[in-house]
Amino acid sequence: MPRACVVGTGPAGLAVADVLLAAGVPVDLVDEQPRAGGNIGRAMTDAALGPMRRRPELGGGRYRPGHPVLSVSPAREVVVRGPQRIERERFDAVFLCTGASDGQLPRPGLRQAGVKTAGALQALLKGQDVVPEGRVVIAGAGPFLHVVAADLARAGARVTDVVDRVAVIAYTGLLAKSRGLIGNLIEFVRTQAFLRTRGVKVRFATEVVEMGPSTLHLGGGKSLGFDVLGLSDWFAPQTQLARTAGCTIGYSQLGRYFRVECDAYGRAGVPGIFVAGEGQGVRGAIHAGLSGRLAAIAWLVDQGRPAPDATALLARREQVIGFAEKLEMIMYPAAREIDASAIACPCERVPVAAVREAVAFGLEDLNSIKSVTRCGMGNCQGRYCEPVVCRLLEAAGRRPRAPLNQKTLVRPIPVGMLADG
Ligand SMILES: Cc1cc2nc3c(=O)[nH]c(=O)nc-3n(C[C@H](O)[C@H](O)[C@H](O)COP(=O)(O)OP(=O)(O)OC[C@H]3O[C@@H](n4cnc5c(N)ncnc54)[C@H](O)[C@@H]3O)c2cc1C
């Protein structure tokens, strides 16, 4: 019996597992987080494990929470950090469902206590019931900010303001055109109404320019006090494992990030390796579930096994992608001017000015920029500075040419473990 490994237990990974387990394929379901559900459902542990719980008799695979996957080879060898040692295992198919991360544009004063990403505040709340104390401001760009503000307010946090770079008219235009996605419109309106009842001031079309200790300076000369700030300007796919596996990585002009180039089923250019969910491009939870189902179906078909019909899933996928791309258009307009003194790579403390200098010198691929500036050499291996460097290249009129190379390992581990593994 062929065996499959699914990396990531968000909506994409769980959808893959659901289809494969229904077809009788043993699945190893691996996630570095201690609880299943991915970024949207981290709190719904039991429901999220549905695929495994409903069909234990078809398993034979394993659910492995708290296990970071360190690399995946083109020959489908999956390297996992186990409790004591590094473990390696080869599978017949590997489904990479590793989601996205949110990040911040460099600004003067950004790297100080009390500033987190909005996603980090939400993860602390959902994963560990941490409710921030004092005045909480959520800022950056996109509908996600409003969701986080509402979640925090519901949990008892004193959220005072939401500062969103996107204009309300842009949202209205987008939502009016989102045929088949009326749920998004209803959710957005409901969230605004809720924030109003909690006295949260929502400022649309407003830019965060810089920050001092406990003060945000906004475009138009206004200032705002805060104790805790959740700031998120962008989302970008986590493609590090796809890079170690040799998948084709391409640049998205709309999202201003690198993503995995796949066919509509998530076939990622390497036999037996599929990418589902945000790795294909940041498109939201509905797309993640659809793409997970499609990837599992594609592998079953490739194996000559019976598989569910994919016609309706493919049509719905197109519709959802259309909406997500329009959202990226309004979230990421032409790159704005970034202050030269701000930090582009927080791990290595590389200033924006150093990256600009490298770009002015004529460098266009990120590995060359990394060599001369150290941008991307730190702990996060470029997850947070790559989208920033892409924006700096675009601001200089260049198109980012090649992504950062991803060597094994995609997560830091103790040297002793490496020696034993
Ligand atoms: C921080 C954040 C918060 C979000 N909150 C919301 C929200 O409240 N509402 C909403 O509608 N949308 C939210 N989104 C968007 C939503 O999460 C996505 O649209 C959807 O969850 C994508 O599903 P996915 O399965 O592709 O990835 P995810 O749900 O992100 O799941 C990916 C999983 O892969 C795991 N993983 C990644 N790398 C590795 C590795 N190397 N080894 C092992 N496991 C790994 C992660 O731990 C994670 O559990 C959020 C996105 C982010 C980044």
Image: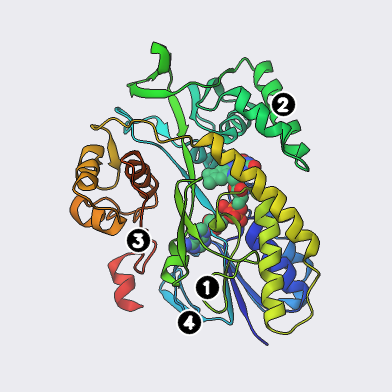
Tell me the quadrant of the picture where the N terminus can be found.
bottom right
Amino acid on which the number 4 mark rests in the picture: Ala
List x then y, in percent, for residue 262.
56, 65
The answer to whether 78 is drawn above or below residue 410 in the figure is below
In the picture of the structure, the residue carrying the numbered disc 3 is 412
Q: Residues within 10 Å of mark 1 (few under 14, many from 20)?
A: some
Q: Nearer the viewer, mark 1 or mark 4?
A: 1
Q: CA distance from mark 3 to mark 1?
A: 27 Å
Q: Nearer the viewer, mark 3 or mark 2?
A: 2
List x then y, in percent, for residue 174.
66, 33
Q: CA distance from mark 1 to mark 2?
A: 41 Å
For marks 2 and 4, the one nearer the N-term is 4
Tell me the quadrant of the picture where the C terminus can be found.
bottom left
For marks 3 and 2, the one nearer the N-term is 2
Residue pictured at 69% horizontal, 83% vertical: 303
Residue pictured at 39% horizontal, 63% vertical: 410
List x then y, in percent, for residue 248.
47, 67
For marks 3 and 1, the one nearer the N-term is 1
Q: Residues within 10 Å of mark 2 (few under 14, many from 20)?
A: few
Amino acid on which the number 1 mark rests in the picture: Gly
Dot label at residue 189 = 2
Amino acid on which the number 2 mark rests in the picture: Val
Q: Secondary structure at mark 4?
A: loop
Q: Is residue 78 among the parts visible in the rendering?
A: yes
Residue pictured at 46% horizontal, 36% vertical: 233
In the image, is the residue at mark 2 within 8 Å of ligand 1 by its beta carbon?
A: no
In the picture of the structure, the residue carrying the numbered disc 4 is 75
